[in-house]
Image: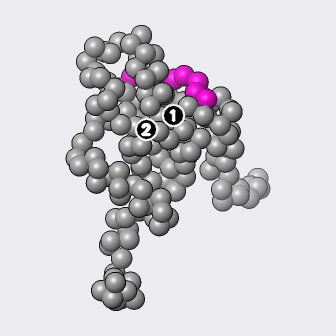
């Protein structure tokens, strides 16, 4: 029995509909209660609008009464670089997020929110996580930082 070669990226979903603002995407939301709430969203909807609708949809599910108001929570998702990312900027549209899969984990806000938001923005600008950048042991990078 011969096996066919499998392309390296065959397991990576390259879905262009997630970057299309006019597309309707089925998105799953994992609430802190362990309940999974699925519904369709437009790519042009903002995170704030989606969160508001999520709370309306979640009210139809058990354990909703144990949740706080939606302002206490933030969405976490996995981006296309396979990194977990928290979405603090609720003005972003769904199509603007670099989603690997349309799945969000709803988490309580923790830590210094402004610092996390700034770190996220810096990561978008430099193209890599700030943690990776800070942990670089490359002597050339260290010399450059000292010179700056």
Is residue 41 shown in magenta?
A: yes
- In the rendered image, residue 49, in percent from the top left (x then y), is placed at 48, 27
Question: From this viewpoint, is residue 61 visible?
Answer: no
- In the rendered image, residue 79, in percent from the top left (x then y), is placed at 50, 50
Q: In this picture, which residue range is highlighted in magenta?
A: 35-42
Q: Which residue is drawn at 37% across and 27% down?
A: 31
- In the rendered image, residue 132, in percent from the top left (x then y), is placed at 38, 68
- Look at the image and tell me in which quarter the C terminus lies: bottom left
Q: Residue furthest left?
A: 111
Q: Is mark 2 on a helix, strand or loop?
A: loop
Q: Which residue is drawn at 64% across and 43% down?
A: 19
Spatial separation of the CA atoms under disc 1 and disc 2? 6 Å
Q: Is residue 27 above or below residue 133?
A: above
- Provide the residue designation for mark 1: 46
Tell me if 115 is positioned left or right of 43 in this view: left
Report if the CB atoms under discs 1 and 2 are less than 8 Å apart: yes
Q: Which residue is drawn at 56% across and 45% down?
A: 96
- Viewer-proximal residue among 61 and 2: 61
- Provide the residue designation for mark 2: 90
Tell me if 48 is positioned left or right of 134 in this view: right
Is disc 1 surrounded by few (<14), some (14 to 19) or many (20+) residues within 10 Å? some
């Amino acid at each position: 029995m011969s096996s066919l070669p499998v392309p390296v990226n065959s397991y990576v979903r390259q879905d262009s509909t997630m970057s299309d603002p006019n597309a309707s995407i089925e998105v799953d939301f994992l609430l802190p209660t362990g309940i999974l709430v699925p519904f369709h969203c437009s790519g042009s909807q903002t995170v704030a609008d989606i969160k508001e609708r999520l709370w309306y949809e979640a009210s139809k599910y058990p354990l909703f009464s144990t949740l706080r108001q939606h302002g206490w929570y933030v969405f976490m998702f996995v981006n296309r670089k396979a990194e977990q990312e928290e979405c603090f900027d609720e003005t972003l549209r769904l199509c603007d997020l670099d989603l690997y899969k349309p799945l969000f984990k709803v988490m309580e806000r923790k830590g210094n929110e402004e610092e996390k938001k700034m770190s996220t923005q810096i990561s978008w600008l430099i193209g890599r996580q700030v943690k990776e950048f800070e942990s670089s042991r490359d002597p050339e990078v260290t010399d450059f930082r000292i010179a700056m």
